[in-house]
Image (spheres, grey):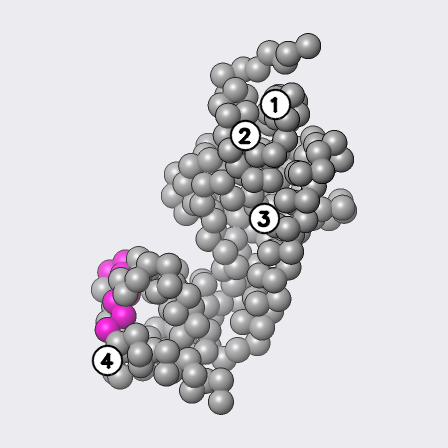
């Protein structure tokens, strides 16, 4: 018997069909999952969930971006990831357990996301080997990301600033769309400390800053700064 889906659920089903790890599921399984899901809209800077909150669902980004924050001790918060359309969050790190959310998810701008109940996701994983295998691969990617974050948290502030800039340059090129406040969040240090670190790099003419943007002037020197911190 074919399920009758609402307009939102039909849109969700169409999105799930082309989004891993759901894209390998059958049409009937996609419809069953979509019937249990709901579409939610968040304004910029809205908190989708906070670290330690009771968790009963994962989320899939349809439109917009989400930043994932992790408490790193003291007053430090690290930005672990910046996720976009087609990315799942609040799910992989809890698979197989009833653990609370292990991070905080905040909308970077206007956000549209699909709420996927844990029970429905688990039921689909048990029915579909393809979905289960793809989920395992994504979990492996998440574990590697967490290991990198732990290592990142042990670095000095200077090392974290340089490595963050290099990572962002790989994504955006020499003009990085970021405020100094955002950079401080990604680095996991106070704004004042990060501002001083940027001043050192500016003095060496490695970069310049302006409102909402960081310009890399000498990528070779930035890479050398990274290599020097590893010695």
Q: Nearer the viewer, mark 3 or mark 4?
A: 4
Disc with the residue nearer the chain's start (3 vs 4): 3
Disc with the residue nearer the chain's start (2 vs 3): 2
How far across and down, in percent of the image, does residue 87 sit?
A: 51, 44
Label 3, label 1: how far apart the Cα atoms are:
33 Å
Disc with the residue nearer the chain's start (1 vs 4): 1
Q: What span is in magenta?
A: 211-217
Residue at the image position 45 percent from the left and 45 percent from the top: 84
Disc with the residue nearer the chain's start (4 vs 2): 2
Label 3, label 4: how far apart the Cα atoms are:
39 Å
Q: Please state which of residues 130 and 108 is positioned toward the viewer in this rendering.
A: 130
The dot on residue 205 is 4
Decide if residue 56 is on the left or right side of residue 163.
right
Q: Are marks 2 and 1 in contact (CB under 8 Å)?
A: yes
For the question of whether residue 75 can be seen, the reply is no
Q: Label 2: which residue?
A: 17
How far across and down, in percent of the image, does residue 215 sit?
A: 25, 67
Q: Nearer the viewer, mark 3 or mark 1?
A: 1
Q: Could you say which quadrant of the image residue 134 lies in?
A: top right
Residue 139 in magenta? no
Above or below for 106 versus 77: above
């Amino acid at each position: 018997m074919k399920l009758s889906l609402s307009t939102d659920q039909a849109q969700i089903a169409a999105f799930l069909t082309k989004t891993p790890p759901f894209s390998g599921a059958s049409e009937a399984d996609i419809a069953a999952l979509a019937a249990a899901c709901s579409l939610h809209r968040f304004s910029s800077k809205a908190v989708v969930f906070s670290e330690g909150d009771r968790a009963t669902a994962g989320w899939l980004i349809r439109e917009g971006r989400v930043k994932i924050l992790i408490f790193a001790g003291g007053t430090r918060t690290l930005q672990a990831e910046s996720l976009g359309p087609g990315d799942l969050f609040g799910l992989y790190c809890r698979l197989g357990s009833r653990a609370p959310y292990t991070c905080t998810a905040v909308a970077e701008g206007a956000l549209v996301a699909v709420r996927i109940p844990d029970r429905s996701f688990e039921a689909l994983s048990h029915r579909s080997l393809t979905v289960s295998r793809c989920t395992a691969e994504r979990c492996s990617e998440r574990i590697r990301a967490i290991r990198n974050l732990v290592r990142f948290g042990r670095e000095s502030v200077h090392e974290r600033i340089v490595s963050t800039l290099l990572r962002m340059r790989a994504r955006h090129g020499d003009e990085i769309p970021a405020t100094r406040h955002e950079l401080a969040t990604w680095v996991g240090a106070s704004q004042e400390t990060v501002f001083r670190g940027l001043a050192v790099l500016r003095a060496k003419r490695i970069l310049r800053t302006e409102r909402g943007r960081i310009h890399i002037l000498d990528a070779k020197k930035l890479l050398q700064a990274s290599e020097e911190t590893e010695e």
